[in-house]
Amino acid sequence: MSVTINDYLALSFLIFTIGFVGVLVRRNFLTVLMSIELMLNAVNLNLIAFSRRLSDLTGQIFSVFVITIAAGEAAIGLAIIISLYRQRKTLNVDEADTMEG
Amino acid sequence: MRDLLWLIPLLPLAGFAINGILYLVSHRTHGEAHPGHEVHPAEAKPAPSPTTAEDAPPHASAPSAHVDRHPHVPFKTAHVFVSLATTGLSCLLAFAAIVDWVKAEGLAHAHVVTLATWIPQGMNALRGGGSAAFDVDWAFRLDPLSALMISFVTFVGFLIHVYSVGYMGHEEGFGRFFAYLNLFMFSMLILVLGANFAVMFTGWEGVGLCSYLLIGYYYEKDFAADAGKKAFVVNRIGDLGFALGIFGVFAIFGSLDFGTVFSAAAAHPERFAPYATAICLCLFVGAMGKSAQIPLYVWLPDAMAGPTPVSALIHAATMVTAGVYMVVRCNVFFRLAPDAMNFVAIIGCVTAILAASMALVQNDIKKVLAYSTISQLGYMFLGCGVGAFVGGIFHVFTHAFFKACLFLGSGSVIHAMAGEQDMRKMGGLKEQLPTTRWTYLVSTLAIAGIFPFAGFFSKDEILGETFGHHRVFLWGIAIVAAVMTAFYMFRSYFMTFTGTFRGTDEQKRHLHESPGTMTWPLRLLAVGAALAGFVGIPEVLSAIFGVPHALARWLSPIFPEIPGVAPEAHLTPGTEAALMVFSVTVAVIGIAIAWRFYTGERAFERPRRLAERFPAAYRVLFNKYYVDEAYDAVFVEGLGKGGGRFLWDFDARVVDGFFVHGARNVVLALSWVSSLFDQYVVDGLVNGVAGTLQAGFRGLRHAQTGRVQNYAFVMGGGFLLLVAAYLIWR
């Protein structure tokens, strides 16, 4: 039994869903950030699977870009978390609701 | 030569780059050599508003003032050379290209130079089942209209550059100023030369940016920075309309190219006519913002916070006329939309009279000219609105000369008065400033519409056409505005140049005529103000002079015939002559009133008595109908802080109080106009905004939890719903 593109897509979908639900339900900022990381990597997996399947390098190049962006996103996200922690002494996302109307 | 068209805007851009780099380099080294130097408020000169002149920085009068007054300007010669060479060359090139094009191709064939592809095969537009590619080129178009515009934009622009060399000579930010000014020339030329709506919009936004930068040139001062922001924000409202209009044009024609779009509209008017009104109204909203029409005019008076050459170039001669240019450019659309035309005419007419009435009581010499500019722009739109597109663009042309000359003249006066702008402190300056006085007088006669100065021809054409299209009511209002124009312009002339000097002794000793770099542009512009009108001699007079209306003939190719749209009606020679005599007579009456009021031994006594007899009317005029206050309350305070109760308070106190005061003086026609404005615009705005806000946003507030995860949940849920909907109904 060989691994088909459907398996890749199923795995990618699973990881993406885990990541998305993590973003929605977890209250710890760090966990939310890690969940976003999961979502991005699920997308990478998807891109590379299609790239292999279609013999088109665009997808792989795209995933390199995604990794770059993810690195930047992690850096900025962590910076935000640190400054939030300094201000609020907490990492609970529900406490960061200054923008409530 | 005509293929070098693209060089005309690009030369000033090169000037901008060189000036900007030189300024940055010198500024950095300079700052290191003299720490703290860069924060000093450079200008001993223009203190742009009388209210703020008093709280000028204390060190302006300190012993070290001499150093501040003449700071070292690094690379000054290089800045002067670069900016004058680029604008001068671009001016010469413009004229050479026009001559070459007319000789080689003739007026009827627009010459289009495509420089590069900008957006190749972008998104597609759906129209009637098919689709069209969004294909935009960097293309420039030379046709009678753009030729006219580039000729005076480059010429007046060059003169104002020369003038600025003298006027800004002692400014520490000399290089920055010239860099911005060159960038403005680039944007303005892109605007008028662009061969499609996208390129035009690029220039449109570019001039807005430069306007913002130059209004806020004295950015250390709060009011200048605020004025810049105000201009930028108000213009964004207009630009939204313009952008919507462009989207509409693309949705219907599948192209943004002027040639394609207008010939399609002229060839199949029946297919386009249903959409014409909506598109024209959107486009006109853009013109209202850029050309300072009611209700978006509020930024222009504040824009006087910029240096005077900027007021002359950007806020009088060129940028603010971009709206008129755009309307004339889109004349095919507008002629298909009579309702939109009516709207344009009414807005123009109301703007003309309201701005003129506000100018009656201003004491700041630049503010008078600012309101006068708004009023003249109103005339131009009135002309366009009644179908006299040639008249509108003709007034743009003549106005560029006389208004630039007036502004530069006022700059020369302010220069001599060491920054004083209050006309009550001037008087009798004709002795010390003879050149400024004569050029100012010529331009004042031109704007008042006295034969044979330029303003007479263009204003008379607009008035005549308004009358000829049976808009007698609008014509009447425009005539009243003409009387006011003659009055307030001569009021400013008499207050400044005749009588006795009313300033301090120190100011009196400082009085001097400006240097040659400032007086020569004044002289040339005054010649333009005197003679520019002869390019458009009306029919009645052409028999006497033996010269036809050259401008109408020149511009005729840009007004293609549209089947089903009647050509313009013509007045009989007798009526035309009678109207001409009448409008000159009323202008003379306005001048005579100004002469009675502001000259002789009992000068100022009559206007003071008049103001005392009608205090409410005077206050309303002096406070410019409280429009700024109303906008501030409704849009800034009201929307910003969401206080519905505040709006009701404002309504009860200011508006009702103001209304009652106004009603007491119904005898005055002006109060009547202002109360109408109040009732429909201000009241309507206040009540409408307050009601909508309270009702609509109470529920919406609860959706704003401030928690990111809630937002993410809504977003994800929405996405899933969209996918589900797609899967079900695809």
Image (tube, coloured by chain):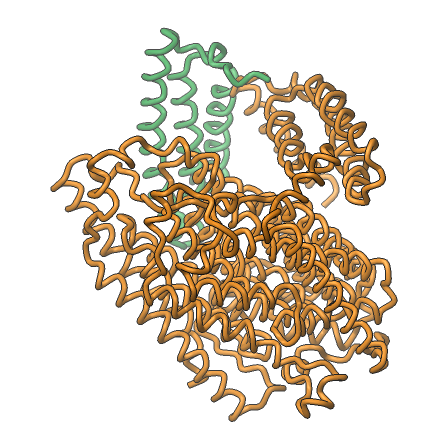
Chain colours: A green, B orange
Task: Please tell me which residue is depicted at 36% across the width and 25% down the height of the picture.
Answer: A77
B688 relative position to B61: left or right: right
Question: Quarter-wise, where is residue B431 in the image?
Answer: bottom left
Task: Please tell me which residue is depicted at 68% across the width and 44% down the height of the picture.
Answer: B606
In the foreground, B699 or B226: B226
Farthest top residue? A89
Q: Give the percent coordinates (x, y) of residue A52.
A: 40, 48
Farthest front residue? B601
Residue B35 versus residue B494 in the image, above or below: above
Task: Please tell me which residue is depicted at 14% across the width and 39% down the height of the picture.
Answer: B34
Residue A68 versus residue B339 in the image, above or below: above
Task: Please tell me which residue is depicted at 59% across the width and 49% down the height of the picture.
Answer: B601
Q: How many marks?
A: 0
In the foreground, A27 or B236: B236
Q: Give the percent coordinates (x, y) of residue B360.
A: 65, 48
Question: Quarter-wise, where is residue B256 in the image?
Answer: bottom right
Confirm whether residue B650 shows in the render.
Answer: yes
Quarter holding the N terminus of chain B is bottom left
Confirm whether residue A1 shows in the render.
Answer: no
B484 relative position to B171: left or right: right
In the foreground, B235 or B502: B502
Question: Quarter-wise, where is residue B412 in the image?
Answer: bottom left
Q: Give the percent coordinates (x, y) of residue B605.
A: 64, 42
A82 relative position to B189: left or right: left
Q: Give the percent coordinates (x, y) of residue B532.
A: 57, 76
Residue B62 versus residue B572 in the image, above or below: above
Farthest left residue? B33
